[in-house]
Amino acid sequence: MRSYLKASILGLIAVLSVSGVAVAASAPWVANPGTTYDPATGVVTLVNSGAGTSYETPNLDVPVANGDTISFEWRSSDVACAGGVPRVFIQGGAYNTFDQDPAGPGACGTAADADGWRTVTGTVSGIVDGIAGYTGIVNDNPADPGTIQVRNLVINGVSVLPSNAPTSKDACKNGGWKNGPYKNQGQCVSTFAKAK
């Protein structure tokens, strides 16, 4: 049994290291009312009906320092980027992605792709102890309630939302590449081709 367990763990580590993005150990995320998480797609859906909602963990336990990169993808068909939405915070407000560049394109992300996903990338600042502890994804603009979706949250190179990321070239096909940290199917396929 120990040999099987050890082989399984080593296999999982090998698969995760092939993707080029480390994956956080299990973090106790809590879906507040109006929020759901789909582990099959790695997508968090946050429905703000006026009171706001979030997906949070009290202790993410991911090393982070000022100057590190944080990124995530988001989309919405009925919520505008404004009023702090979309937003990811680290350590109870020590760092907010939206607050870092509220007037510029960084807060809202890149232009939407064909599926409506935008990528927000920021530089961490205001961190004191070097650990992303209390962390959350938020949809709480009272002036614009509605639904946003978030996926592929990466803090300091660590993917903190587990998903069904591809583990082979074949898994990249038929849209499977969208479940990992890839920009397109070709990038996903080439990642596994390089691993040989």
Image (spheres, rainbow, N blue to C red):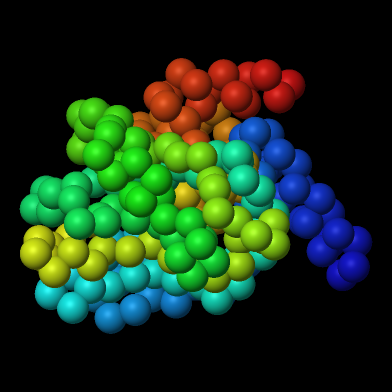
Please state which of residues 87 and 186 is positioned toward the viewer in this rendering: 87
* Quadrant hosting residue 140: bottom left
Image position of 142 (left or right of 151): left
Q: 101 above or below 126?
A: above
**What count of labels does the image hold?**
0
Asked whether the viewer can see residue 150, the reply is no
In the rendered image, residue 142, in percent from the top left (x then y), is placed at 13, 69
Q: In the rendered image, which quarter contains the N terminus?
A: bottom right
Q: What residue do we see at 18% from left, 70% from top?
A: 48
Q: Quadrant of residue 192?
A: top right
* Picture residue at 34% right of the left edge, 55% below the top: 87
Q: Nearer the viewer, residue 153 or 196?
A: 153
For the point 25% across and 55% down, the residue is 85
Q: Position of residue 12 (x, y in %)?
A: 71, 50
Locate residue 76 relative to residue 78 in the image: left or right. right
Q: Is residue 80 above or below residue 39?
A: above
The residue lying at 28 percent from left, 44 percent from top is 102
Q: Position of residue 93 (x, y in %)?
A: 46, 65
